[in-house]
Image (cartoon, grey):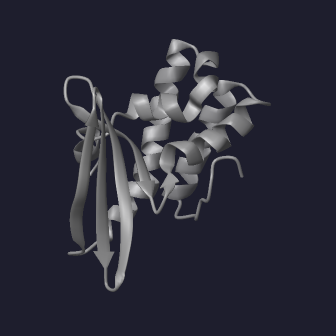
Amino acid sequence: MRTVADGFFDWRELSRRAAAEGWAKFSPKQQDDFVTAFSELLQKTYIRKLEKYNNEKVTYLKEQIEADKAFINTQVTMKDKAIPINYIMIKHDKWMVYDVVVEGVSLVKNYRTQFAKILSREAPDALIQRIKDKIKSLDEGKNVDDVAG
């Protein structure tokens, strides 16, 4: 599943946007470590949830392209519930997803809030370690809510 996700997600862009102003505090090595850890965390949390889907209907509602950005609106219908899932993409060599908005909640903005809180009082290495700790907890089968907690 990771290989498939790597082909669609721009993990560096997603990570940079989630870190927001804090990105400048990271050294190039810390940026690389952060992208690696954060992408692994996202895959262990969100991509695993996608694996549970079974023949749900995905409807492509709208596509809007503005220069090097694209907004793709979809709807996933599960039983009697329709869930809006929107993808925000950026074009480098090819179109890649850098944000997913589920029922109005942006993945990037959700993590941006958590990361800003942590980076306001801790160094980038501490944030990277927190993410690695969350990954370890997930690997041990523990339920993990957020990075800041």
- Judge left or right: residue 1 versus residue 32: left
- Judge left or right: residue 40 versus residue 19: left
Question: In the depicted view, which residue is nearer to us: 66 or 42?
Answer: 66
Q: Residue drawn 29% across and 27% down? A: 68
Q: Is residue 55 above or below residue 85?
A: below
Where residue 137 appears, x then y in whole percent? 58, 55
Q: Residue drawn 41% across and 28% down? A: 12
Q: Is residue 31 above or below residue 52?
A: above
Where residue 133 appears, x then y in whole percent? 61, 45
Question: In the depicted view, which residue is nearer to us: 91 or 44?
Answer: 91
Where residue 64 appears, x then y in whole percent? 27, 43
Q: Is residue 97 above or below residue 44?
A: above
- Judge left or right: residue 113 versus residue 51: right
Q: Residue drawn 46% across and 23% down? A: 32
- Judge left or right: residue 126 versus residue 31: right
* Count of numbered badges drawn on the protein: 0
Q: Residue drawn 41% across and 29% down? A: 13
Where residue 108 appears, x then y in whole percent? 51, 42
